[in-house]
Amino acid sequence: MKFNDTYFSRPQRYVLGIEQSSGRPYLGIPVSNRMVDYEESYWLTPDQYNRFHEQPDLAAAFAEECRRREHDDLLILKPGTDRGVPM
């Protein structure tokens, strides 16, 4: 998988992008476990992706829901046993 970030919000700590091989959009949030900092990425629908670009507050709210693990069903890569915590 190759992730191509298209928008980054430093204050809200999320990215929007397109996964190159599938062409599917995603939202990513930074997380950290005891060994490494990394990004958890969540699939979006094309409509969500477009709406989040137009209305960043909606994207920030969705990112917060992801931090609370409310959208784990949309995780692109399922975490291991040492899952990171949001940064």
Image: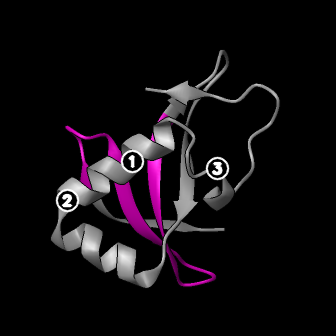
Q: Earlier in the sequence, mark 2 or mark 1?
A: 2
Give the vertical position of 70 relative to 25 (above or below): above
Q: Earlier in the sequence, mark 3 or mark 2?
A: 2
Q: Earlier in the sequence, mark 1 or mark 3?
A: 1
Q: How busy is the neighbourhood of tag 2: few (under 14 within 10 Å), some, or many (20 plus)?
A: some
Residue at numbered disc 3: 72
| Residue 68 location (% of width, % of height) | 50, 35
State how many labels appear.
3
| Residue 62 location (% of width, % of height) | 38, 53
Residue at numbered disc 1: 63
Task: Give the side of residue 78 with respect to residue 64, left or right.
Answer: right
Give, as a single range, the part of the protein colored magenta.
8-30
Question: Does residue 38 appear in this view?
Answer: yes
- Label 3, label 2: how far apart the Cα atoms are: 21 Å
At label 1, the amino acid type is Ala
Which image quadrant is residue 64 in? top left
Along the line of sight, the residue nearer the viewer: 69 or 53: 69
Residue at numbered disc 2: 56
Residue displayed at 54% across by 84% down: 23
